[in-house]
Image (spheres, rainbow, N blue to C red):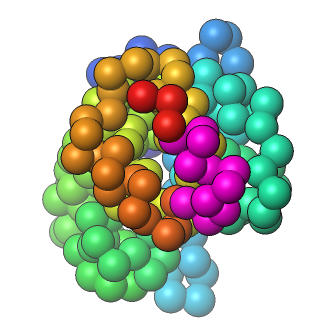
Amino acid sequence: MKKLKEVSASFPGVIASRNKLKFKYEKKVVAELVFEHLARVDAYVLVGLVYGGSLFDCASHYTPPYKSNLFGGAGFSFTTSGDRGKIFSGDFGGAIKTPDSVSLRSVCDHIGSVLEDFYIPMVLGCIAPTGRTIRDVLSAPDNYAYPAVFVHCAMSLCPGLVSEQELSEVLSCKEIVKNKGYDLPLLALK
């Protein structure tokens, strides 16, 4: 908890509570990063959800003719369980074993570092567009309810955000462009 409070203090609108970080936008909690304990393996995974913010609000005005990648109405969601990028845990399992007293400080420092450098900026970029928003969609489009709509909203809210190369990658990504008749006109905003 102490480390979570230290980390959250560096980011306006991010609040630490027992096993999670809450993200506030316009005085409402719109996202969370939650540490889930897996009792069977005595380890922790990180779960992220975004269910509000300017990008979510924009995307809520669209009804694509295909199913969402996510359940439950979130605009963005992920878990580190099975994470191939190994950012959170350093291995393919995506979980960090509950540390013993000897390794507690180093594990907490590692978690603080990956929260500050990767996960918090990623969630902030899902609440309102930032310089990393499009790269994050390209790296894991299945984590977004409707990735083409999400990219469209990011481009609408922040003109000039998307480089020509990123737009080309977006347009050629089948996990983003699921229905050419619907998604391509949205992405032609630029």
Q: Quadrant of residue 96?
A: bottom left
Pick the residue in front: 47 or 9.
Answer: 47
Q: Is residue 62 visible?
A: yes
Q: Position of residue 74 (x, y in %)?
A: 72, 48
Q: Residue at x 50, y 88 (%)?
A: 41
Q: Position of residue 16 (x, y in %)?
A: 50, 32
Q: Quadrant of residue 52?
A: top right
Figure quadrant of the N terminus: top left
Q: Quadrant of residue 29?
A: top right
Q: In the rendered view, does 34 fall on the left or right side of 111? A: right
Whether 148 is drawn above or below 120: the answer is below
- As drawn, the residue found furthest toward the top would be 26
Badge count: 0
Q: Position of residue 13 (x, y in %)?
A: 50, 18
Whether 163 is drawn above or below 175: the answer is above
Figure quadrant of the C terminus: top left
Q: Residue at x 48, y 76 (%)?
A: 81
Q: Which stretch did the figure color magenta?
A: 177-187
Asked if the magenta segment contains residue 9, the reply would be no
Pick the residue in front: 60 or 28.
Answer: 60
Pick the residue in front: 48 or 182.
Answer: 182
- As drawn, the residue found furthest toward the bottom would be 40
Q: Residue at x 23, y 46 (%)?
A: 165
Which secondary structure class fits the magenta region best? helix
Q: Is residue 116 visible?
A: no
Whether 8 is drawn above or below 13: the answer is below
Q: Residue at x 43, y 34 (%)?
A: 125
Q: Position of residue 31 (x, y in %)?
A: 61, 36
Pick the residue in front: 24 or 142.
Answer: 142
Whether 129 is drawn above or below 122: the answer is above
Asked if the magenta segment contains residue 185, the reply would be yes
